[in-house]
């Protein structure tokens, strides 16, 4: 196959981890006879510095012209003082909206080699951690109206959290279809005891659940979900929720697996073109030091091969290579443990290429 990949290296450690993912993609291309070409895209802080805005229209056009998009990370303290509309993260929101990416899939999977790194008790870890958070990505409070105004002499801020039946139904179907490929269980997370949006969410999900009698369904309030993720994560298979709840819960879920640097994600819409990125941030404190863990980005590239390009065997080969490297005791600093060998970001990429 010949595929064009838009590459957003981004800010902080982004360029370092993306370089290792491309190294692995090139090794896969050589082994399986594919051709991957890369189109460089500026987004985030680097785009602000270069172009004066977080996602210029020409850069979005590059992403829309590609077969898929690989992203490192955006943001950092350098741009924290900018107005909200000009911050690096606005580029990411604009990219998701521009590409029509309404579903974000974040697996929370404990790699057995890193079991000791989980902050949970061994008795909880022993039951297993393997679930996926399906997060609605283009609706809710992040895309609602935001305003700050003066009322009776004081500042009052308002953020609107809109959802339509159609938005809820399409993400719900993603969750139920995903569950059919896993362990046939969906947990829908909301705050229906307080929010109208959550009551609508629950109503639509109940209607959908009737269409999927082979999938076990349950409602769970978001505060309880946050507790249950650390009490007994083995109970979950597919967790589906709205944008802000999903943002928070997926970060919590990633941390119980031992290292946020290991977790990939995919964002998809109606077609096969997607946005693939690790879930961690730009880590400006270690940027440029060759210390970052590139595995989350490498696994994100693997997800791209599977979900956007239909390359199941290639995906499995990368995952097997990661297992082999972890079995050999190689670790970056974030997941270092007694008896293991600490390696740099680039050395980890080299090791995974060698294992391929």
Image: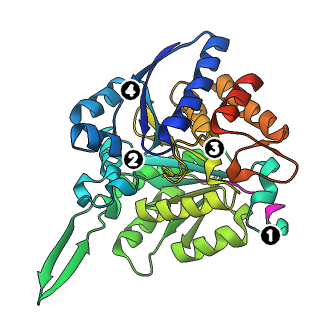
In percent of width and height, residue 82 lies at 25, 58
Up-down: is 349 above or below 92? Answer: above
Q: Which mark is residue 102?
A: 2
Q: Is residue 41 magenta?
A: no
The residue sitting at 74% across, 61% down in the picture is 118
In the shown orientation, is residue 180 left or right of residue 173? right
- Mark 2 vs mark 3, foreground winner is 3
| Measured Cα–Cα span from mark 4 to mark 2 | 24 Å
Residue 347 picture location, percent across and down: 69, 32
Q: Are marks 1 and 4 in contact (CB under 8 Å)?
A: no
On the rendered structure, is 244 left or right of 326?
A: left
Please report whichever mark, 2 or 1, sits nearer to the chain's N-terminal start: 2
* Marks 1, 4: nearer the viewer: 4
Assign a secondary structure to mark 1.
Answer: loop
Foreground mark, 1 or 3? 3
Task: Identify the residue under disc 4.
Answer: 40
Neighbours of disc 2 within 10 Å: few (<14), some (14-19), many (20+): many
Q: Return the mark for residue 121.
A: 1
Q: Residue furthest front?
A: 289
* Residue range of the region highlighted in magenta in the rendering: 125-132
């Amino acid at each position: 196959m010949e595929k064009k990949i838009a590459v957003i290296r981004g800010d902080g450690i982004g360029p370092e981890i993306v370089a290792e993912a491309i190294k692995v993609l090139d090794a896969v291309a050589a082994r399986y006879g594919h051709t991957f070409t890369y189109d460089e895209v500026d987004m985030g802080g680097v785009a602000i510095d270069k172009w004066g805005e977080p996602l210029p229209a020409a850069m979005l056009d590059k992403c829309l012209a590609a077969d898929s998009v690989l992203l490192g990370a955006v943001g950092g303290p350098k741009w924290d003082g900018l107005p909200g509309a000009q911050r690096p993260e606005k580029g990411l929101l604009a990219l998701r909206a521009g590409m029509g990416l309404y579903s974000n899939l974040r697996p929370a999977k404990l790699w057995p080699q890193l079991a000791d790194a989980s902050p949970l008790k061994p008795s909880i870890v022993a039951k297993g951690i393997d679930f996926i958070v399906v997060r609605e990505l283009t609706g809710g409070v992040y895309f609602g109206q935001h305003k700050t105004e003066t009322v009776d002499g004081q500042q009052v801020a308002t953020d609107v959290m809109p959802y339509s039946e159609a938005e809820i139904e399409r993400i719900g179907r993603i969750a139920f279809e995903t569950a059919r490929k896993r362990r046939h269980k969906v947990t829908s997370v909301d705050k229906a005891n307080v929010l109208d949006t959550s009551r609508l969410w629950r109503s639509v999900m109940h209607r959908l659940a009737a269409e999927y009698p082979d999938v076990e369904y349950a409602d769970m309030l978001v505060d309880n979900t946050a507790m249950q993720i650390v009490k007994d994560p083995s109970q979950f298979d597919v967790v589906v929720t709205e944008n802000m709840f999903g943002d928070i819960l997926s970060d919590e879920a990633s941390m119980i697996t031992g290292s946020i640097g290991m977790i990939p994600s995919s964002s998809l819409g109606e077609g096969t073109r997607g946005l693939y990125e690790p879930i961690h941030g730009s880590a400006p404190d270690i940027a440029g030091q060759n210390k970052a863990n590139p595995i989350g980005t490498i696994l994100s590239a693997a997800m791209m091969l599977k979900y956007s390009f239909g390359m199941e065997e290639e995906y499995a080969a990368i995952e097997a290579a990661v297992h082999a490297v972890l079995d050999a005791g190689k670790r970056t600093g974030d997941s270092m443990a007694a008896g293991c060998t600490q390696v740099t970001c680039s050395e980890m990429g080299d090791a995974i290429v060698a294992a391929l």
